[in-house]
Amino acid sequence: MPTVRDATFTLLRKLGLTTIFGNPGSTEEPFLKDFPADFRYVLALQEASAVGMADGFAQGTGRPALVNLHTAPGVGNAMGNIITAARNKTPLIITAGQQTRSMLLMEAFLSNVRATELPMPHVKWSYEPVRAQDVPAAFMRAYAEAVQAPAGPVFLSLPLDDWEQQAEGEAVLRSVSGRVAPDPARLSLVARAIRDSRSPCLVMGAGVDRSGGWDAGVRLSESLGCPVYAAPIAERVGFPTDHPQYRGPLPFAIAPLSRALEGHDLVMVVGAEVFRYYPYLPGEYLPAGTQLWQLTDDPAEAARAPVGESLIGDARLCLEGLSALLEDFQPGWQRATRPAAPPRPAAEASSPMSAQDLFAAVAAERPAGSIVVQEAPSSIPALTRHLVFDQPGSYFTMASGGLGFGLPAAVGLALAERQSGRGRAVLACIGDGSLHYSVQSLWTAAQHGLKVVVIVPRNGEYTILKMFARQENTPGVPGLDLPGLDGVKIAQGYGVAALRAGTPDEVRAALREALMKDGPTLIEVPIAPDAGKLLG
């Protein structure tokens, strides 16, 4: 009979989970010993980076990823990015070693006390097998839990003495659906609302991109000819940003968002919550007389929506279903066309340059179809103004609001691009404050020779927090300046080619050179801090 370890690795092979992200500890070594030649171990120097890399890899491949952490301290180190994975709806199977079963009662050194409670409520399922023989089946259930809609991370606590126990044969391999089809009767109500509308709009969220629904969204929007907005502070782009019907992202506060929707009598929110708000700017959730329908695969999102009607269903299936129901419909409203963009100011020879000038330079050299990972919060307006996202799976950020995801996610996405053979370049736009949350990821990128170009807008402060302070009238907050950091030297210490670019021409030249290399490059760019408010 095989051991528990043998049965587990056999199951992982069948599930295609042959890449493991982690940072090993003594409680994990019995699982990792004599590591199989057909598996790949991606070493991170800290557990938050391991989870962030796995998150990016899973999103890039469209499949679950496996992470191995070191008992309770490792899970604690990783918690920020576990929370982000939950908000990102990324299917991760997160495992952590546990002390020997016979010493758990006395809470011996490195025991994970109340192990299953530690990552809650930020995982979908958390389990420590009662018997060693249950470990392989627990992996099968973890996989099934992770991929079912809404996808997300799960957690297994695995005692270190389980692996050499005799298994009860091979684990049963099962398959489960990752999509939820919408209720046809309720979808018909949405179609009826569209037919009865005079001025509808669509709001596309990250769920459209996750579901592979870009084409379906474009097809429906073009048949309706209505304006299309991006959901506020979405972690992925659900609609081409250069499309003539695209109106940009909605504001992420109650009153400004409601004002942005004025003139629409029907709002259809697809693949997003209603809505992702942060600063409290009170007002009506919707303009008077406006009806809202939310189409989401997440029952919790539907339950907590403060306004509107909800339909549970996969974003792509909902969009395709609506197109079928409206095949004979001829809209009576005027087709939306893109308003004229305000003129872009010419680049100024200022030192340091502005974020606008930086991202205008990046846009000039960015390869078509390349992936952008964004974790430079104060530079988002400049980035989204200049960079076009006209292909699915080309923009990623964190849905949680917590820093430390972007850099390791870029590494995971680059691994996914290499594995898939697509080979798209990955540009990581990471603020100088964000960089240091998971800076260890640079080492992993260097070790694997990944083509990741890390662009660091260096404004020497937590600009986004100063913007919040102005928004919230909270002057005198300490700890918002970041003097004495040198991203170039730190990157070089991890084995990454790095340089500083001070003008738009230097940025363009550095980016061109970096994109010709096989390994990672970090480009630090001094910029002037934004002195404005978060929202008007």
Image (cartoon, grey):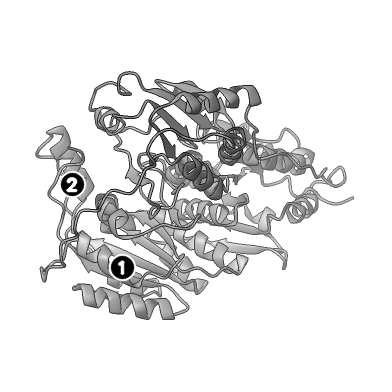
Q: Is residue 299 left or right of residue 3?
A: left
Check the image and report above or below for 265 versus 246: above
Judging by the rendered image, the residue that carries numbered circle 1 is 362
| Res 344 → quadrant | bottom left
Q: Residue at x 22, y 46 (%)?
A: 464
Which one is earlier in the sequence, the residue at label 1 or at label 2? Answer: 1
Residue at position x 41%, y 62% in the image: 440
Task: Give me the disc on residue 479.
Answer: 2
Whole-percent x, y for residue 255 in the image? 25, 27
Residue 219 vs 124, above or below: the answer is below
Residue 271 horizontal side relative to residue 255, left or right: right
**Callout 1, which amino acid?**
Val
Mark 1 against mark 2, which lies toward the viewer?
A: 1
Q: Secondary structure at mark 2?
A: loop
- Residue 436 spot, x, y in % from top left: 32, 57
Give the residue type at disc 2: Gly
14 vs 270, nearest the viewer: 270
Q: Evaluate whether residue 177 shows in this view.
A: yes
Q: Which residue shows up at 16% across the image and 36% down it? A: 471
Q: Which of 16 and 296 lies nearest the eye of the viewer?
A: 296
